[in-house]
Amino acid sequence: MLDNFTHIIDLKDDTEYEIDPRFGEDEYVDSLNFFKENINNFKTSFITYFQVDEPSYSLNFVKYDGQNLFHAEVDYLDDFSGLEDESDEYYNFMNDLDKGYLDIKLLDGNSWVNWKKLTLKIN
């Protein structure tokens, strides 16, 4: 497994795509389309996350192992994090999440994270 989340995705044409871990602004990834459309353009392995708020909240993880692309979606952050909703620790967790500082160790053995393989999107 990769050591850290990244929010900069390197592409084969030597450009980068930045994933904003926050949500609520116009400058964020709000679907898997970017990943599906670029599955053959990723330069290196990565693991990242993004949040969406429509139609309901979800935290989305995407990882690329150099050949395959995988996705996992989490709907309930208190269950995923193991923290009590509205506690100080939970608010600190939410703050870190929005800043892009989520600890990748939260994925280790987490029963709320179920990876599914994604395939190339054909228009």
Image (cartoon, rainbow, N blue to C red):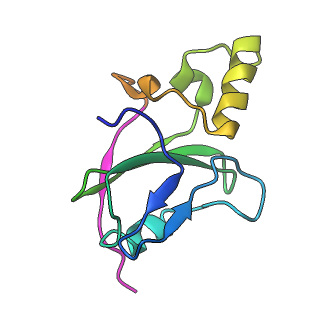
Left-right relation of 117 to 72: left
Along the viewing direction, whichever of 111 and 33 lies nearer the viewer: 33
Left-right relation of 91 to 38: right
Q: Residue at x 42, y 71 (%)?
A: 14
Q: Is residue 61 visible?
A: no
Q: Is residue 60 visible?
A: yes
Image quadrant assignment for residue 66: bottom left
Left-right relation of 2 to 24: left
Q: Which residues are magenta?
A: 113-123
Q: Residue furthest left?
A: 67
Q: Is residue 49 above or below residue 33?
A: above
Q: Percent x, y for residue 111?
A: 38, 25
Q: Percent x, y for residue 20?
A: 64, 53
Whether residue 83 appears in magenta in the rendering, the answer is no
Image quadrant assignment for residue 99: top right
Q: Is residue 72 above or below residue 122?
A: above
In the rendered image, which quarter contains the N terminus? top left
Q: Is residue 12 above or below residue 20?
A: below
In the rendered image, which quarter contains the C terminus? bottom left
Q: Percent x, y for residue 34?
A: 49, 69
